[in-house]
Image: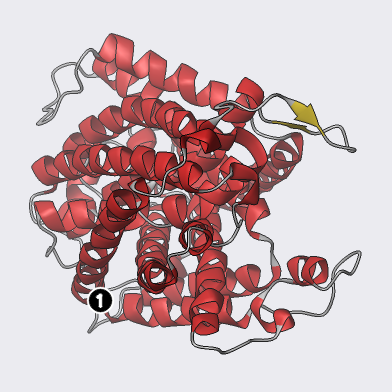
Amino acid sequence: MNNSIWRKKPMAAYEADMKKSELKRVLTKWGLTSLGIGAIIGGGIFTLTGIAAHDHAGPALALAFVIAAIGCTFASLCYAEFSSILPVEGSAYAYSYGTVGEIFAWLIGWNLILEYMMGATTVAVAWSGYFEKLVHLFGIELPVTLMNDPYTAGTKLGVDGPVPAFNIAAFFITWIVTSVLVRGIQESAKTNNIIVITKLSVVLFVIIVGAFFVKTENWHPFIPERVFDADGKGHFGWDGVVTAATIVFFAYIGFDAVSTQAGEAINPRKDIPFAIVASLVICTILYILVSLVLTGMVKYDTLDLKAPVASAFADAGLPWAVFIITIAAVAGLTSVMLVMMLGQTRIFLGMAKDGLLPAFFKTIHPNFKTPWKSTILVGLIVSIVSALTPIDKVSEMCSMGTLLAFAMISGAVLLLRYQQPDIERPYKAPLIWFVAPMGVLFNVFLMTQVRRETWHAFLIWSTLGILVYFLYSRNKSNLNKN
């Protein structure tokens, strides 16, 4: 028995997990890339652009996307190397378990739960905003109290504080996605592929058509002067750009979701690294172009927080384009939810296989070959939280979990190079002695720029995770058995 919190899962155990996996290996190189794009393109373009530009960066939103992309590039190269060594479900959690130790793996896994759960919740709320706009285009007005959380509904009704409200649209879309995920990975991937083609076409439409309606004066000043509100909270300036980078960082976590699908990839050692890098490069270029067009079409302080892209085209006098964008956003955000919730259940699966979570989370459906029980549980939690929580609160919590995972994996891949230099690495990250430390520093720096309230919530969540580990997971761990 090894009772140390620094115990590591041996490489032989990973090999055994791969051989006895009950999941279907059906995902190709481009199928994995499509899943990555499906997770990345959505919340970042259709929703977070409004929050980040309106409240923090102004036209310098494009710079925020560049900053976030740089940090993601360092982390993505480290992820790619790890995924070629350990092509198993579990993503950063699994990678750190074999290199740094169980307590670190647990903390990463615990925060990945936060990342994916809050990610899916953020997108569900955003989906509701675009769905409300879509039905409005057909002349249908839905009650404010049925399309918003209690706090947002109170604001819209001019009430100081929450009112009785329930975001029923966010609640129902979560259960629709849950039902697709329970049915199987092949059905989920096919659904995602169709949606990805649709929304990539619309993103290109936004860039090309929107470019004709850009007014360069809307870009001045490119970085608005730093201001403080009545509560002493700062906005804009370079600090605002960096804060915006921490918010839009959420938009890039799709490449992390790719690594959670290793158990269902046909050739994971080669295809996972390709899909991680390809999806990140494609989406970064699109994000920068869309942010420039968006802040050029309308003044940043007039952007709608829930549906900024559609609102920008409406303000530009293009109501016909609003139909196209809104329909694509509704479909596109659905695929983001699908991949977020898919990744969440595979994290649960990896942790449950190692004994750190109850067997409930690793129960595979005999016909669908999916972890159906945990999928339904995730659907239940996401549906309730999304129906009752404002979008800006959940999006920042998601970014915190992502930043921590990226920083720790960047350090762990360098540690593994030192500990086991001769291990087979089908993909090796270039300039690892530079890339890995920069991945750690960059992501830790972005964590320091997150708002104090977000830090408080993050520390509470982490403390709860440590308690769960010492009260349950440490003793139940497979490594704690003879």
The residue positioned 51% from the left and 47% from the top of the image is 49
**Is 19 above or below relative to 149?**
above
**Rendered image quadrant of residue 327:** bottom left
The residue positioned 40% from the left and 66% from the top of the image is 329
**Rendered image quadrant of residue 287:** top left
**Colour scheme of the rendered structure:** secondary structure
- Quick one: 170 or 305, which is closer to the camera? 305
How crowded is the residue under tag 1: few (<14 C-alpha within 10 Å), some, or many (20+)? some
Q: Quadrant of the N terminus?
A: top left
- Quick one: 341 or 482, which is closer to the camera? 341
Residue type indicated by callout 1: Gly
**Is 449 above or below relative to 2?**
above
Disc count in the image?
1
Which percent across, then down, holds residue 452? 75, 34
Residue 250 is at least partly visible in this image: no
**Rendered image quadrant of residue 370:** bottom left
- Quick one: 336 or 321, which is closer to the camera? 321
**Is 327 above or below relative to 462?**
below
Element at badge 1? loop
Which percent across, then down, holds residue 463? 69, 42
392 left or right of 152 in image: left
Residue 182 is at least partly visible in this image: yes
The residue positioned 46% from the left and 49% from the top of the image is 477
34 left or right of 210 in image: left
Which percent across, then down, holds residue 259? 28, 47
The residue tagged 1 is 184
